[in-house]
Image: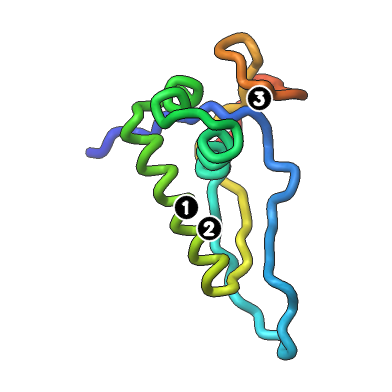
Amino acid sequence: MSRPKKCRKVCSMPVVNMFSPAPLQEEIYVEPIVMTIDEYETIRLIDREGFSQNDCSKYMNVARTTVQQVYNSARKKIADALVLGIPLEIYGGDYIICDRKELPCSCCGCNSIFYKH
């Protein structure tokens, strides 16, 4: 029996949750690549905010190795979307929105609602 997934703390929901390449001449539907909210959060914290993987793991309340796996998965999805011209959609995962009572994260509009999608 596998261990249950631990919810990852995220600052807030993404402002934009869908990215897509400019439309081609032909209207062909392509299934979007799905990035989870916790994958998005690792990209935001590490690449945008400059957190180390260790700092990111402390903020998200998970092991550093978990952050490394989530971050690598997120980067692969971004690379696939850019290189292959596939839409990228951000939703789902097991996460909790931060309540701004723990580590400072420079977030705004947080609340303590639990999400499990």
Residue hosting label 3:
113
Identified by mark 3, the residue type is: Ile
Q: Is residue 55 left or right of residue 96?
A: left
Where disc 2 sits, the SS reads: helix
Residue under the point 53% across and 26% down: 9
21 and 32: which is toward the camera: 21
Mark toward the viewer: 3 or 2: 2
Identified by mark 1, the residue type is: Arg
User: Looking at the image, can residue 39 be seen?
Assistant: yes
| Quadrant position of residue 57 | top left
Percent coordinates x, y for residue 116 in the rendering: 55, 37
- Where the C terminus falls, by quadrant? top right
Residue under the point 54% across and 40% down: 47
| Quadrant position of residue 63 | top left
For the view shown, which residue lies furthest in the left direction?
1
User: Looking at the image, can residue 117 be seen?
Assistant: no
Percent coordinates x, y for residue 110 in the rendering: 71, 23
Image marks 1 and 2: residues in contact by CB distance under 8 Å? yes
Image marks 1 and 3: residues in contact by CB distance under 8 Å? no
Residue hosting label 1:
75
Residue hosting label 2:
78
Where disc 3 sits, the SS reads: loop
Q: Which mark is residue 53?
A: none
Residue under the point 36% across and 43% down: 69
